[in-house]
Amino acid sequence: MNENSHSKTQQPFREWKGYEKNLFRFFFIFLIIQIVPVDWKFYHKLLSINWLQLHFHDLFELSKYQPQFFSEETLDSWYIGSFANWLLFALLAAIGTVVWARLDAQRREYTVLYYWLRVLVRYRLAFVLITYGFIKFFPLQMPYPSLSNLLTNYGDYFAWKIYFQTVGIAPKYESFLGFVEILAAFLLFNRRTVTFGVGLIFGFLGNVAVANGFYAIGEAVLSTFIVLLAAFLFAYDIPRLYDLLVREVPARANKFSYSFNAKARRLRLLAKAAFLLFVLIFAYKAFDNYTNDPYKIPHTPGLDKAYGYYQVREFVLNKDTIPYSKTDPNRWQDVIFEKWSTLTIRQNRPVKIDFSSGEAVHEKDIDRNYELAGFAGRHYFYYEADTLKHTLSLQNKNKNHRTERMQLKYERPNDSTILLSGTNERQDSIHVVLSRINKKYMMFEGRRKPVKI
């Protein structure tokens, strides 16, 4: 039985041209290498997951899987881009195409195999869109900017952090973007609506791919891969769309439908059920993380009623009072207490930038680095407060300054003043008087009502 006998029509398919068969062979190998897990790291990640205490990020990492035979360190040392793995895949696909063409020279067409490749591409796209969709729908990927972020100079931001802050500051818009990705995933799930899903991907994720390139977000390869898969699916519809929209002549509908036997129908139902189960589990886990403990934001509450922006009214270092200065490396300029156990200080002391994306999941607050990743300008300290002894034990959150610690006592003579005294990161004695500034932020006050400054 040949592959043509599986179609409902039982009619022979048209013979493909030579270049069509070679293009198919090339893209079949090129895409299969990246869709079917061939990288041992995928299985290492899969087997390391604690399925009894599943975190949504475990599934998220699996959905982002791409084989990587050259490590990021190797690519950096060779001064070549992140697409170097693609060059290897393309080389393997070219070699495979030549070998395949010689071994299968009499083949007239690959219609059925093309059908199954499209199925794999559709599911691969749908899985990754679902995960990215839900971490936007429940604003986890780009959280609302912290107070310290809002009071950091624009020039101190990396480009990717500007992009994340710009989207994160509008949670409803971020949720809408997530909804678009989820909708596109379900349109891909149904063969009859694939064209509409691909259209959404081009309109939305095409822009994401461009933003990755210009803002150096760090997902340029994955976002481009998503667009490539969408383009592969769209290529199937180009002749008919060209006839309909450009030539304005009747376009033949896609009548090809694979005829499944009983066993194949059960496998198809199992695949669909697995996909829907994945959607439900991921959606629940993402919602649970968003409502109980957003993974990019520290979860330990900060000092009670201390949240705010403080001017350093008085600063004494080793019993010497230092007047306000933007150039003195020792003098604090301002201090911010976040809603969680983070205290940030602006001073004219260099910050070794944390170049990570802050995407990793950490249990300890001191390791949750999204709030400080991607910009300079402020020093971020995690603190533990002893409310009985009125002490703060601080440690720098930046992995490049992690050895810096401070031990401070605090007093609160009134609601807007905090007195700090103790030793700084160099074990110098300090005494600091902080006065809260009731600064108004237009985004909090609203755009459609009068604001009194």
Image (cartoon, rainbow, N blue to C red):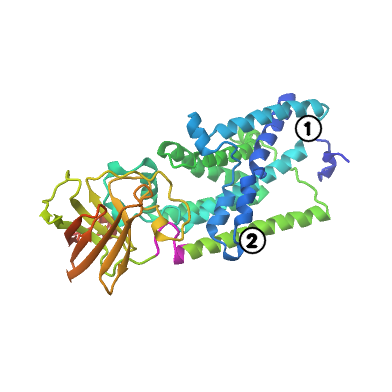
**Circle 1 sits on which residue?**
109
The residue at the point 20 percent across, 63 percent down is 420
Quick one: quadrant of the N terminus? top right
Q: Quadrant of the C terminus?
A: bottom left
The x, y position of residue 154, in whole percent, is: 28, 44
**Secondary structure state at the residue bearing disc 1:** loop
Q: Secondary structure at mark 2?
A: helix
Residue type pointed to by label 2: Leu
Q: Which picture quadrant has residue 235?
A: top right
Q: Which residue lies at the image location 61% right of the left edge and 31% below the top edge?
A: 88
Query: Can you give x and y, in whole percent of width and height, for residue 118 in the image?
Result: 68, 42
Q: Nearer the viewer, residue 152 or 424?
A: 424
- Residue topped by disc 2: 277
N-terminal-most mark, 2 or 1: 1
Q: Residue at x 56, y 47 (%)?
A: 64
Between the residue at mark 2 and the residue at mark 1, the CA separation in whole angstroms equals 36 Å
Q: Is residue 14 left or right of residue 291?
A: right
Left or right side of 452 for 366 = right
Q: Is residue 297 left or right of residue 313?
A: right
Q: In this view of the protein, can residue 247 be seen by the observer?
A: no
> Magenta span covers which residues?
290-299
Task: Classify residue 393 as left or right of residue 319.
Answer: right
Number of marks in picture: 2
Q: Is residue 32 magenta?
A: no
